[in-house]
Image (cartoon, grey):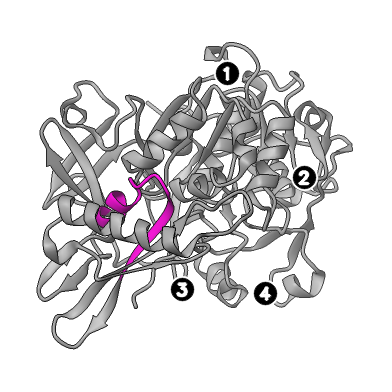
């Protein structure tokens, strides 16, 4: 028996009610999705992309969103290029993914140097025209894994694997307006775009370099009901007074460890919202969501019967198997994505305490102090509990005796005039050290604490980590 072809994104939109006036908003323009029913943003050239491996390389997020709606089910392969990719790696991407067509809004000279003959311009506006949207096969979606340095790592998804956790729009009650700090060309942002498109609703897109306060103000003006970001996104956003103007029904964290402090801060900021944190990654897909207001996840998640997501712990590391995981890596036949049983090794270390598992850090992010291992995130979780701490980062600092010692940088709440009192800073640092000594073994207690004005976040919304 042949497998039934998965509906394309365009066909799925029709089933979700494309005619409803749902909108994609940016800082300076918008697209009403029903306009796509009788037009195109690709200048009538969609047919030229049929059966091709297409690189989607745009500066503009809205243009990218419209293009991927049009191309899924038409192209053989769709490669979503994140905006922060070093252009020097594009020749590798083109060769490895077999790219033979490019959709772009970038300057012509940037694109022609890649040696691809079929270049299609993408616009933010939909032009009325006849378009042949006949879908012939299931498009492969190629996504870049987050946090990649050097040569980019790419994985293969399908629309079915990307939408496995999304319920149809009919299950939603009332108008839904999504907003996300993520970029839609990364896994986290793409999930929210697909939830808006297929699950039903409109979406407020962030702009490159946009301050959290400005994005929140725009989201509030559009009546956002559902909003998502990483814990680092939220820590920065909650420093802004504008955050209190929001009144969402649903607020979610994902992409990093959600410690108890940020969950509590989010619930305090949005007392009427359902606050959730989810585990998802580009490779593993969406695994689960936790909505009980507590960090970590119940141990019972590992024993769920008849679940389409299976979890197991191997050497303290979480592994996931489901129809939502990526299929394979692209371009490296020697690196296996799945283990022999079909599980993805997430690299996330967990620790069981009572009837709950807690994330303590990444397997590759350990600080070694005299042979004793420390996950920076577990120290940060303690520091972040202090009511005056807004963000923190724990790193290793070289030491001639132990090889390394633990050092912490913290961002503190400031007074209304933006000033920090020197005496208060010293007092707060002493309180943080006291809390660390109570909660942590001696080798995990920071040897130094430095107060700084801000901490850098990667384009994918994660805290920038470095070794000192």
Height in image: 291 above or below 160?
above
Question: CA–CA distance between discs 2 and 3?
Answer: 32 Å
Q: Which mark is residue 169?
A: 1
Task: Give whichever of 36, 314 is nearer the camera.
Answer: 314
From mark 1 to mark 3, how far is it between C-alphas?
A: 38 Å
Q: Nearer the viewer, mark 3 or mark 4?
A: 3
First in sequence, mark 2 or 4: give its number: 2
Residue 463, quarter of picture: bottom left
CA neighbours of label 1 inside 10 A, class few (<14), some (14 to 19), many (20+): some
Q: Left or right of 269: which side holds 221?
A: right
**Residue at the far bottom in the pictured view:** 400
Q: Secondary structure at mark 2?
A: loop
Residue 108 drawn at (x, y percent): 81, 70
**Residue under circle 2?**
27
351 vs 423, left or right, is: left
| Chain-order first, disc 2 or disc 3 | 2
Q: Quadrant of the C terminus?
A: bottom left
- Would you name the residue on which mark 3 appears? 151
- Reading the chain from its start, which is encountered first: label 1 or label 2? 2
Q: Which residues are magenta?
A: 378-395
- For the residues labelled 4 and 1, the Cα–Cα distance comes to 40 Å
Query: Which image quadrant: the N terminus?
Result: top left
Answer whether labels 1 and 3 touch (C-beta < 8 Å).
no
Q: Residues within 10 Å of mark 2 (few under 14, many from 20)?
A: some
Q: Is residue 120 left or right of residue 57?
A: right
Q: Residue furthest front?
A: 423
Q: Contact, CB < 8 Å: mark 2 with mark 4?
A: no
- The span from disc 3 to disc 4 (Cα, nearest Å) is 16 Å
Secondary structure type for disc 1: helix
């Amino acid at each position: 028996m042949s497998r039934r072809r998965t509906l394309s994104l365009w066909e799925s939109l029709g089933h979700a009610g494309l005619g409803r006036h749902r909108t994609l908003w940016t800082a300076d323009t918008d697209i009403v999705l029903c306009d796509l029913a009788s037009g195109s943003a690709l200048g009538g050239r969609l047919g030229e992309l049929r059966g091709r491996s297409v690189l989607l390389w745009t500066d503009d997020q809205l243009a990218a969103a419209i293009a991927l709606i049009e191309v899924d089910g038409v192209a053989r392969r769709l490669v979503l290029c994140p905006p922060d990719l070093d252009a020097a790696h594009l020749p590798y991407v083109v060769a490895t993914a077999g790219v033979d067509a490019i959709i772009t809004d970038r300057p012509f000279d940037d694109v022609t140097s890649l040696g691809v003959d079929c270049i299609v311009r993408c616009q933010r506006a939909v032009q009325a025209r006849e378009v042949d949207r006949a879908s012939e096969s299931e498009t492969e979606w190629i996504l870049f894994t987050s946090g990649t340095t050097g040569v980019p790592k790419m994985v293969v998804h399908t629309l079915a694997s990307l939408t496995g956790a999304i319920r149809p729009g009919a299950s939603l009650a009332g108008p839904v307006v999504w907003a996300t700090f993520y970029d839609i060309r990364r896994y986290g942002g793409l999930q929210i775009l697909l939830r808006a498109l297929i699950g039903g609703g409109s979406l407020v897109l962030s702009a490159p370099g946009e301050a959290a306060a400005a994005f929140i103000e725009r989201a509030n003006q559009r009546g956002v009901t559902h909003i998502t970001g990483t814990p680092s996104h939220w820590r920065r956003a909650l420093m802004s007074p504008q955050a209190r103007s929001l009144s969402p029904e649903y607020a979610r964290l994902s992409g990093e460890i959600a410690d108890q402090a940020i969950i509590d801060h989010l619930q305090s900021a949005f007392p009427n919202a359902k606050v959730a944190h989810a585990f998802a990654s580009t490779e593993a897909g969406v695994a689960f969501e936790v909505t009980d207001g507590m960090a970590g996840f119940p141990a019972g998640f590992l024993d769920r019967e008849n679940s389409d997501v299976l979890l197991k712990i191997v050497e303290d590391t979480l592994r996931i198997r489901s129809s939502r995981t990526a299929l394979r890596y692209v371009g490296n036949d020697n690196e296996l994505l799945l283990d022999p049983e079909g599980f993805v090794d997430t690299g996330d270390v967990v620790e069981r305490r009572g009837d709950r598992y807690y994330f303590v850090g990444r397997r590759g992010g350990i600080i070694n102090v005299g042979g004793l291992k420390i996950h920076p995130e577990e120290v940060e979780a303690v520091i972040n509990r202090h009511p005056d701490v807004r963000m923190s980062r724990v790193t290793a600092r070289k030491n001639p005796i132990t090889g390394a010692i633990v050092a912490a940088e913290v961002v503190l709440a400031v007074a209304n005039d933006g000033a920090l009192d020197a005496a208060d800073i010293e007092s707060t640092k002493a309180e943080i050290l006291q809390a660390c000594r109570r909660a942590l073994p001696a080798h995990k207690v920071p040897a130094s604490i430095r107060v700084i004005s801000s901490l850098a976040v990667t384009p994918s919304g994660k805290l920038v980590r470095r070794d000192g």
